[in-house]
Image: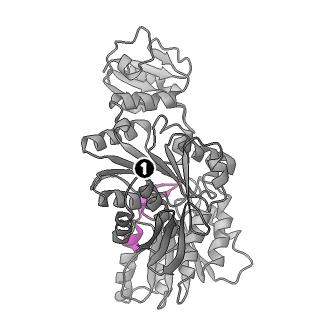
Amino acid sequence: MLLKSLIPDYKGKFENVEISGVTCNSKEIKAGYLFICISGTNVDGHKFAASAKDAGAAIIVAEKDTGLDNQIIVPDTHVAYFNISANWFSNPADKLKIIGVTGTNGKTSVTYMLKKILETAGEKVGLIGTIQNMIGDKVFDSHNTTPGAYELNSLFNEMVKSGCTYAIMEVSSHALDQRRVCNITFEAAIFTNLTQDHLDYHKTMDNYLLAKKLLFKMCKKAIVNSDDPYCEKLCFGLDCKVVTYSASDNSQYSAKGINYHPESVEYELMSDSGINHIKVRTGGKFTVYNSLASAVCALELGIDVDTVSKALFDMNGVKGRAEAIPNEFGFSVIIDYAHTPDGLKNILSTFKECKKNRIITVFGCGGDRDKTKRPIMGNIAVHNSDFVIVTSDNPRSEEPMAIIKDILEGTSGTATPLKVIENRIEAIKYAISIAAENDIIVLAGKGHETYQILNTGTIHLDEREVVAEAFKELREGKLNA
């Protein structure tokens, strides 16, 4: 493809240079490639411009002078990378109705619920998110909640070729801040909530909110949780149509008469068009909010309420989101991705409302991430559990016991029994070994993940496998506290 097709605004001596590929990774360079210098959080791509040229890059796109004779200077290489990638794939986003979901918690569940509703309505749907990417029923690995510009446009292109009419995607604050989704027109965008997370990156909650707000400056219609304290700030100054939903007050769409059960919720969906019964086969207040967000978005897209109701009832749970592991021992094991203060409080509160015996919580906090939430999560755990096991999550470059020490700062002053077991596998097995009938074990933080990132490298760790092994040892009488 000629350079002038990739950068239509460029007028200069390189217009008719043939480009054989596009990348921002200097290790991927082949002869004839276009290399884009991205200034990241930890690495500045401009440092690799010369090595990219030596490897065969035909054109270097940069924000500042690299001293190379094949460079093109642009105001913002992040924006350029998205536009060039979109042009490389003939602008596939323009051929799809794209729905973005953002918020601290609930993004994954909302995207899956909405995908189920649209498919029940007869649409073919692509999904981009934390657990996996999907085109119809085909599953692809996910490396980020929101992929980089080239991978994102590549996925959109595959969706178009496969006949998808909709693409539903989780949109992270990092992706918005780094302009990975710039110049997309979203058919609708959903705001779930905003609670403390990613302050290692954004520094303040106001910065975090401003990053989220960028999505709603690119959409035709905003679907917003009016119960969230940040709702008003998010909506202020938006040019798009704003539609609100609530589970605790009157809004354009409201959930009333909510009934919570251990493994389901049901409520009446109230709107100007009438009252409709909704039942979802996953427990928890968060399920009310997630299903409400997806239902409202679907209704605003023109899907009839009967289809919405049927799809939500028919839907199976989402991997790692309040995922129950069946067993014959009379206690429950729940795997959940809760890794923020609000997420942990939500999942524990859910089971606190319907528990018959103890809640045993196993959790840790990630390394190289916001340290201020560690004692907060420790405090939440001991005040919403009957027994707490503090363990390791993804410590990354940090020492696991240093992270655990931070968590323990928030656990003093309560009578809740607490045990520290650094090894996560041992911690899970211990929880199962002490479980009694009607206990609920909550394994929080890892959710869908099948790995653990240590300071020595990444290892395989799937909690479902650990639980299955513990159950086997329990049956054989080999699991002891």
Q: Nearer the viewer, residue 224 or 254?
A: 254
- Which residue is at a point 56% across and 53% down the rendered structure image? 397
Which element carries disc 1, helix, strand or loop? strand
Extreme residue toward the right, this view: 413
Q: Nearer the viewer, residue 95 or 447?
A: 95
Q: Is residue 22 visible?
A: yes
Q: How many marks?
A: 1
Q: Which residues are magenta?
A: 448-466
Q: Is residue 427 visible?
A: no
Q: Is residue 300 above or below residue 443?
A: above
Q: Amino acid at mark 1?
A: Met
Question: Residue 461 is drawn in which quadrant?
Answer: bottom left
Judge from the rendering whether residue 60 lies leftward or rightward of residue 16; answer left or right: right
Q: Is residue 82 above or below residue 6?
A: below
- Which residue is at a point 45% across and 15% down the rendered structure image? 10
- Which residue is at a point 38% across and 12% down the rendered structure image? 15
Dot 1 crowding, Cα within 10 Å, few <14, some 14–19, many 20+: many
Q: Nearer the viewer, residue 145 or 372?
A: 145
Report which residue position mark 1 lands on: 169
Judge from the rendering whether residue 3 lies leftward or rightward of residue 405; answer left or right: left
